[in-house]
Image (cartoon, helix red, strand yellow):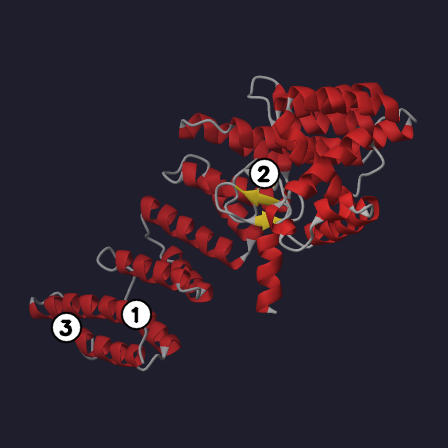
Amino acid sequence: MPTESTFLLAGLFLLLAAAGWAMGRFGERDEADSTPPINIDYLKGLNFLLNEQTDQALEHFLNIVRVDDKTIETHFALGNLFRRRGEVDRAIRIHQNIIARPDLATEQRDQALHSLAKDYLSAGLLDRAEKICARLAQGSRYQVQALEALCRIYEQEQEWQKAIDAGKQLEVLGGRSLELQIAHYYCELAEAAAAAGDYAAARQYVKHAQTGRPRTLRGALTRAHIARDSDDSKTALRLYHRIIDENTWLIAEALPEIVAIYTREDAVPALEKALQSLLEKNPDMSSLVAYTAIVNDIGGIPAIDRCVEQYMLNEPTLGEFVDLQSLSEGGEGESAFDRVRGALGKLATATPRYQCQECGFSSQRLLWQCPSCRDWETQRPASRVQFDTVLQHSITN
């Protein structure tokens, strides 16, 4: 049975068939042309479409219709329709056919190039799309759209300096702020430099990320990681503690680093004191501390262990399966808590830990750019073990 897209294509053919009839009716058709009337040709094309012979219909269409001022918009409409259907190769052929016209007006050529760039992006041909967008970004009517596409391309190719340049140009032309996006580009460069051991360059990139822009969460965390990796434990601890104070949810990233530094320096009593002070100022943070400890298997620190114990006792779903309070009163508390804690750790690692607040995309680790909606810094961590997800998975399997 013909699909909705087939009928849309058929509609395009019928519109042009009517145009062809009118041209023939009023004598605009070349009398020397011995080919059948154009409306008959369109009926042949329509027959191909209704029989879902799309390739034959496309060939027929391109053969009988010249790209001229009367038909070019129909060519564009057909090409865009093919792209939306996922038939990118056909869309590419149509737009290339338009560009091949020698007397094409500049505005129409730019429109065809813009459509062809979108075809290439849909097909994953980033290098070809980049070349066209770079050309359109030099003063065409599609300059803003081309720069937006270049930013997306450079993000995928991890060409962060090029992304910064395109983003700054887009800020000027588009009249909107891309400060957060550009700050993340600089953070990408900082992380790459730190991974290569060039901490001076990494610090400079972070400085660019934060100077003259709203302070990004990632920039603060990257600074702390750089201090950690360059063996500046004092600065790293100061930065990690500041991160938790200013952005509570980042404890999921900062607490394991804090514990590792204190433990490495054999300063667990100082850690205990710092955690007690933190929890006294922010009692609601107890569940975040507990969840982070469970996920990262952090134990042996009294302040953290108390948070985990209280978390398990107050977890309503867990109480449906295990009466920890009774076990504790019966003298089996410590071993029971340890077993349950280990089981919770396994459950936590089997379920998503982060979720995008914009589109709901979930992941096991913090992703600064959501792979689904492509927004920056929208993910937030879970604060509890997702029993519902685990139970649903068990039921469906």
Q: Quadrant of the C terminus?
A: bottom right
Residue found farthest to the top: 212
The tag on residue 4 is 1
Task: Give the camera-side residue of 324 and 377.
Answer: 324
Discs 3/2, front: 2
The residue sitting at 36% across, 48% down in the picture is 111
The residue sitting at 65% across, 53% down in the picture is 351
Secondary structure beneath disc 2? strand
Residue 14 appearing in the image:
yes
Instruction: Check disc 2 and report the residue beneath it.
Output: 380
Disc 1 residue type (three-letter): Glu
Report the Cα–Cα distance between label 2 and label 1.
40 Å
User: Residue 198: horizontal and vertical position, in percent?
Assistant: 81, 29
The residue sitting at 31% across, 72% down in the picture is 6
The number of numbered badges drawn on the structure is 3
Quick one: label 1, few (<14), some, or many (20+) residues within 10 Å? few
- Relative to residue 164, is residue 276 depicted above or below? above
Disc 2 or 1, which lies upstream in sequence?
Answer: 1
The tag on residue 31 is 3
Task: Give the camera-side residue of 97 and 213.
Answer: 213
User: Residue 1: horizontal and vertical position, in percent?
Assistant: 31, 81
Pointers 3 and 2 in contact (CB under 8 A)? no
Report the Cα–Cα distance between label 3 and label 1.
37 Å
Disc 2 residue type (three-letter): Arg
The tag on residue 66 is none
Pointers 2 and 1 in contact (CB under 8 A)? no
Residue found farthest to the front: 330
Task: Give the camera-side residue of 14 and 351.
Answer: 351
- Relative to residue 247, is residue 29 depicted above or below? below
Quick one: label 3, few (<14), some, or many (20+) residues within 10 Å? few
